[in-house]
Structures are given as structure tokens and as C-alpha cells.
Amino acid sequence: MLLAELGPGQKFRVLRVTFGGEIGKRLADLGFISGAEGHVVRAALFHGPMQIRLADYDLIMRRHEAKLVEIELLPQPVPVSEPASEAHAVIDIRPNATGMRPKGMHHLNRGFHHGRPGRP
């Protein structure tokens, strides 16, 4: 499989880089060596460049260069659903049996006022 075939979020392991010269040497210096692992952060539409993350740095790579990197697709982790934290918890702001809103929500009982500011 070739690196250019991957989409955002897919993880890979480099098998080999099939071109030499200045570009091949530069990619080897950046970590594109056999056994290196990384993932595709994002990819532009219409076969545009790809953002690849290897180790602790990002690299923008042209698709025609990515076609010359043979990779092994790594298994993708299964997303684990996490319980809602307090920041994502549902808050009920409906009035209770006494007609009062929960503490800190009393300003919602007033509604919207049109006219001059500060007027009840």
C-alpha cells in the first residue's frame, strides 16, 4: 500500500521509500525510514498535499512524493465512549414545581425587555 492512498486519521508504518536523490535523503533525515510509525493528520482535496505526523513533528508532503512511500496500514483504535463530564452534562433550566428556576438561573424568569436599557 502507498502513503498517498491513506485518509485523515489512518495510522501507518513505513516499509520503504522507493526514491533516492535529494528528496529521498531529506525524507530519511526527517524520519521516513523502515519501521517508522506515523499517521495522516489531514489531506487536501483533489489529490493535494497531505499533513503527516511522524514522532513529534508534522510534515506537509505532496501526493506524488507520498506515492513513492510504501507503508503498512496499522490497526485503528476503536473509539471508547466516555461518560459525560460536568462540562458536557445536561442542565435542566425549566422551572420546578414552585415556579423557580435552579440557582443561578433566576435571570431567565425576567424574559426579554424592549425599550430603554435598565428599564424593568
Image: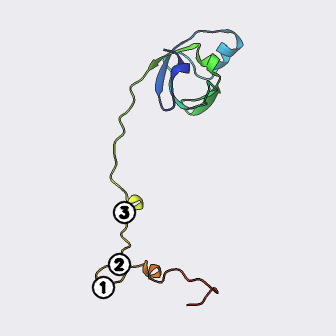
Question: Residue at point 43% right, 77% down?
Answer: 105
Under tag 2, what secondary structure? loop
Using a 10 Å C-alpha cutoff, classify the residue at mark 1 as few (fewer than 14 neighbours), some (14 to 19) or many (20 or more).
Answer: few
Q: Nearer the viewer, mark 2 or mark 3?
A: 2
**Residue at far left of view:** 97
Question: Residue at point 51% right, 31% down?
Answer: 8
Numbered badge on residue 95: 2
Using a 10 Å C-alpha cutoff, classify the residue at mark 3 as few (fewer than 14 neighbours), some (14 to 19) or many (20 or more).
Answer: few
**Residue 23 location (% of width, % of height):** 68, 15
Residue 85 in view, yes or no? yes
**Residue at far right of view:** 22
**Residue 61 location (% of width, % of height):** 64, 24
**Residue 115 location (% of width, % of height):** 62, 85
**Residue at far front of view:** 114
Answer whether labels 2 and 1 touch (C-beta < 8 Å): yes
| Mark 2 vs 3, N-terminal side | 3
Residue 28 in view, yes or no? no
Measure the C-alpha gap from mark 1 to mark 3: 21 Å
Measure the C-alpha gap from mark 2 to mark 1: 7 Å
Q: Tell me the residue that label 3 is attached to.
A: 90
Q: How is the image coloured?
A: rainbow
Q: Amino acid at mark 1?
A: Thr
Q: Tell me the residue that label 1 is attached to.
A: 98
Q: Nearer the viewer, mark 1 or mark 3?
A: 1
Question: Residue at point 30% right, 85% down?
Answer: 98
Measure the C-alpha gap from mark 2 to mark 3: 15 Å
| Mark 1 vs 3, N-terminal side | 3
Task: In the rendered view, tell whether residue 111 sits above or below residue 47.
Answer: below
Q: Amino acid at mark 2?
A: Pro
Question: Residue at point 56% right, 83% down?
Answer: 113
Task: In the rendered view, tell whether residue 111 sits above or below residue 59.
Answer: below
